[in-house]
């Protein structure tokens, strides 16, 4: 578990609005809620609780947004992963799951506006099809959007329309959804942390939670202090070590992103004139979008490549050029990776390890949206409203034996297997 690290050398860290410098915890605190982990889940829950006048403390081992939340593709995509599993169990949940699938977007939009968070939020997204079966899935999704009176513009795009919108011929069609979008994730989570602090929350960085002593009030210890709280939320996602039993419930899959140098207006007009976020439906998916300063941010889920930016860039550039040969003379300015927690059944992992110690982790690739839903659901549960927490925590998690000991080997085997499935 990395402790007291600075941000990875990403495009986001290089363009952050504020470099956070919250203190280390060096005292013994008493609060209502102690949150372990300062990513979207932890910060989003902290803000939702502070808005309800709870006395909240966030402990972050590194920096706010240091984990997946400050490194991701920034694609704000609707839906809760693993939803079909929950609906198979109880079809009566269809309305609630539909509402939950879009709730994170509303929370993000409301916060960006209410707290005036500068995070380059833009609307416009396409799911792109590589195979005919993808088109069939998108047509079903499109029919559902229509049936549900989805309020944002949406519709299928033909092969030609997709090629015109994206300047590439690798896709056979697409589903456009103008309610999804993209944003600068590190600036969002830092802005939300500032908002929580403005409402009385306290944040400690470089203050890893090392141990939880359970009781009517739980005590969370760090190297130099402690927090005693009526409730604890474990929100360390793929990076947490304080409760090891939670780590065997998902595959820690790596995903990597490269950011080009800013593109010329001529190139932008060809490759993405409508500034859409783009994602394919493979497990080893490719996803890309433009940054506010007009770089192409091109990401891919992949086997473990380490942290070396040069290695990541060398590996990903040919992938980007397969889609965009037009960028052959364009330089790569940033390359980085992060870890995504993917449960076998894809259902986000919410639950309790003790009556007053909750956890919320593992949203597969849908975390931007679902972490914001989860923050609100956790705040509800702590305030005594259980409906959504009970639904999301109802699915038994599947343990993956050996994943904490042989993590990278198991993940690489999993990646090989899913890569084969993608090709079918
Ligand atoms: C490269 C990449 C691309 C992605 N792209 C997208 C995308 O485009 N769209 C999308 O919706 N999702 C995407 N995701 C997934 C999304 O980023 C995550 O689901 C989401 O950020 C998870 O947020 P989190 O707060 O739960 O976890 P994290 O952001 O990982 O935060 C966990 C935090 O907890 C801290 N922590 C851990 N243990 C302790 C401890 N013991 N004490 C104190 N602090 C601790 C860590 O330091 C870390 O900062 C992507 C992920 C990656 C890695």
Image (tube, rainbow, N blue to C red):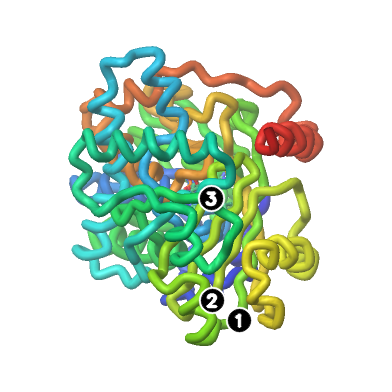
Q: Which secondary structure, mark 1?
A: loop
The image quarter in which residue 110 lies = bottom left
Cβ–Cβ under 8 Å for marks 3 and 2: no
Mark 3 beta carbon near ligand 1 (under 8 Å): no
Cβ–Cβ under 8 Å for marks 1 and 2: yes
Which residue has dot 1 on it?
261
The image quarter in which residue 312 lies = bottom right
Specify which label sits upstream in the sequence, 3 or 2. Answer: 3
Mark 2 beta carbon near ligand 1 (under 8 Å): no
User: Left or right of 114: which side holds 304?
Assistant: right
Q: Which mark is residue 172?
A: 3
Which residue is depicted at the point 24% across and 39% down?
146
Q: Is residue 95 above or below residue 289?
A: above
User: Left or right of 122: which side holds 406?
Assistant: right
Specify which label sits upstream in the sequence, 1 or 3. Answer: 3
Q: Residues within 10 Å of mark 3 (few under 14, many from 20)?
A: some
Cβ–Cβ under 8 Å for marks 1 and 3: no
Q: Which secondary structure, mark 2?
A: loop
Which residue has dot 2 on it?
295
Closest to the camera, between mark 3 and mark 2, is 3
Specify which label sits upstream in the sequence, 1 or 2. Answer: 1
User: Left or right of 404: which side holds 189?
Assistant: left
| Residue 376 image point, x, y percent | 28, 41
| Residue 115 image point, x, y percent | 23, 65
Which residue is depicted at the point 53% across and 57% down?
72
Closest to the camera, between mark 1 and mark 3, is 3
Which residue is more in the foreground, 178 or 312? Answer: 178
| Residue 253 image point, x, y percent | 66, 42
Label 3 – label 2 distance at C-alpha: 25 Å
């Amino acid at each position: 578990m990395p402790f007291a690290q600075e941000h990875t050398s990403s495009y986001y860290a290089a363009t952050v609005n504020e470099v956070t410098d919250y203190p280390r915890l060096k005292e013994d605190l008493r609060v209502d809620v102690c949150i372990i982990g300062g990513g979207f889940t932890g910060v989003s829950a902290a803000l939702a609780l502070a808005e309800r006048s709870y006395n909240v403390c966030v402990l972050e081992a590194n920096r706010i947004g240091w984990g997946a939340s400050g490194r991701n593709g920034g694609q704000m995509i609707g839906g809760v992963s693993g939803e079909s599993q929950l609906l198979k169990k109880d079809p009566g949940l269809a309305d609630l799951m539909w509402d939950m699938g879009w709730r994170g977007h509303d929370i993000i939009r409301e916060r960006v506006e209410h707290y005036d968070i500068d995070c380059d939020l833009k609307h416009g997204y396409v799911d792109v099809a590589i195979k005919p079966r993808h088109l069939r899935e998108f047509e079903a999704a499109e029919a559902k959007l229509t049936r549900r009176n989805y309020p944002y513009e949406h519709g299928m795009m033909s092969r030609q329309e997709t090629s015109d919108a994206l300047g590439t011929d690798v896709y056979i069609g697409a589903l456009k959804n103008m309610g999804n979008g993209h944003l600068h994730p590190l600036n969002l989570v830092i802005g939300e942390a500032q908002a929580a602090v403005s409402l009385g929350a306290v944040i400690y960085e470089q203050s890893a939670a090392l141990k939880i002593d359970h009781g009517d009030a739980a005590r969370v210890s760090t190297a130099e202090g402690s927090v005693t709280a009526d409730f604890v939320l474990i929100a360390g996602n793929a990076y947490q070590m304080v409760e090891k039993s939670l780590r065997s419930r998902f595959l820690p899959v790596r995903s990597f992103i490269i950011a080009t140098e800013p593109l010329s207006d001529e190139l932008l007009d060809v490759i993405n004139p409508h500034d859409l976020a783009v994602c394919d439906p493979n497990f080893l998916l490719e996803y890309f979008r433009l940054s506010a300063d007009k770089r192409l941010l091109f990401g891919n889920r992949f086997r473990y490549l380490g942290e070396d930016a040069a290695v990541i860039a060398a590996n990903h550039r040919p992938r980007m050029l397969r889609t965009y040969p037009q960028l052959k003379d364009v330089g790569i300015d940033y390359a980085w990776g992060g870890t995504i927690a993917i449960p076998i059944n894809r259902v986000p992992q919410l639950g309790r390890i003790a009556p007053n110690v909750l956890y919320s982790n593992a949203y597969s690739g849908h975390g931007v949206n679902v972490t914001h839903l989860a923050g609100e659901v956790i705040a509800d549960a702590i305030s005594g409203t259980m409906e959504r927490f009970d639904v999301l925590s109802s699915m038994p998690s599947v343990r993956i034996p050996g994943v904490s000991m042989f993590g990278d080997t198991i993940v690489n085997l999993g990646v090989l297997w899913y890569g084969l499935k993608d090709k079918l």
